[in-house]
Image: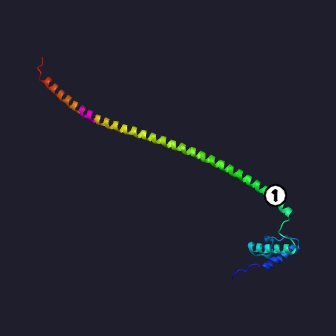
Amino acid sequence: MPRTGITREQVFAVADRLADQGIAPTVAIVRSDLGKGSFTTINQHLGEWKALKWKAEGLTAALPPAVEGKARESLAVLWEFAAREAGQTIERIREAALRDVSEMQEALEEAQRQCQALGAERLALHKHLDQAHQTIATLTTEIARLSESLGASAKRLEDLEAHWQTVMRNRPHP
């Protein structure tokens, strides 16, 4: 079942009654009185009611030239103030942003320096590690050679001892 909206006549009737009671009709008051209706629809009808009422009472939307001139002067002063304030706010924001960018750039450069230093340190450690591996390999070879030599020397010593004992046993006793 389609919804039934409020009509122009309903809004006009409520607005007339409120105005007769000395109450300025507003969208909220008219909607409350009607108990339904969209704010947009009520606002459109109420705007039309006000325009017709002004016309009927001889009111016009045009301002007297003196009032219009003063209004323009006031708006120009207000606009100049707002523009100046906005410019100062923008400048403060720009300066803060430039400071932030500068700080971030410095932090980035420091991080890059640290990365380079760590990279150089890493290369030095790898070089030192390679040298340590070479030294270990050389020492391992030397240990194997000396171990083999020691084994041969021990064998030679055993042979010499055995020969010595044989010589001592075979020698004439005095």
Residue that label 1 marks: 73
The stretch drawn in magenta includes residue 145 = yes
- Quarter of the figure with the C terminus: top left
Extreme top residue here? 174
Question: Residue at the location (60% across, 45% down)?
Answer: 103
Residue nearest the observer in this picture, 133 or 41: 41
Q: Name the image quarter holding the N terminus.
A: bottom right
Q: Position of residue 108 (x, y in %)?
A: 55, 45
SS state under label 1: helix
Dominant secondary structure of the residues highlighted in magenta in the image: helix
Q: Residues within 10 Å of mark 1 (few under 14, many from 20)?
A: few
* Residue 153, image x, y percentages: 22, 30
Q: Which amino acid lies under the numbered mark 1 shown in the image of this protein?
A: Glu
Q: Over which residues does the magenta segment extend?
A: 144-149
Residue 145: quadrant of the picture: top left
In the image: residue 148, left or right of residue 29: left
Query: Would you place residue 40 above or below residue 121 in this image?
Result: below
Horizontal relation, residue 16 to residue 102: left or right: right
Number of marks in picture:
1
Instruction: Please name the residue shown 44% across and 41% down the image.
Output: 122
Task: Identify whether 44 is placed above or below 129.
Answer: below
Could you say where residue 164 lies in the image, as x and y percent from the top left?
16, 25
Is residue 77 located in the magenta-colored stretch of the structure? no
Q: Within the image, what quadrant is residue 34 found in?
A: bottom right
Q: Residue furthest bottom?
A: 1
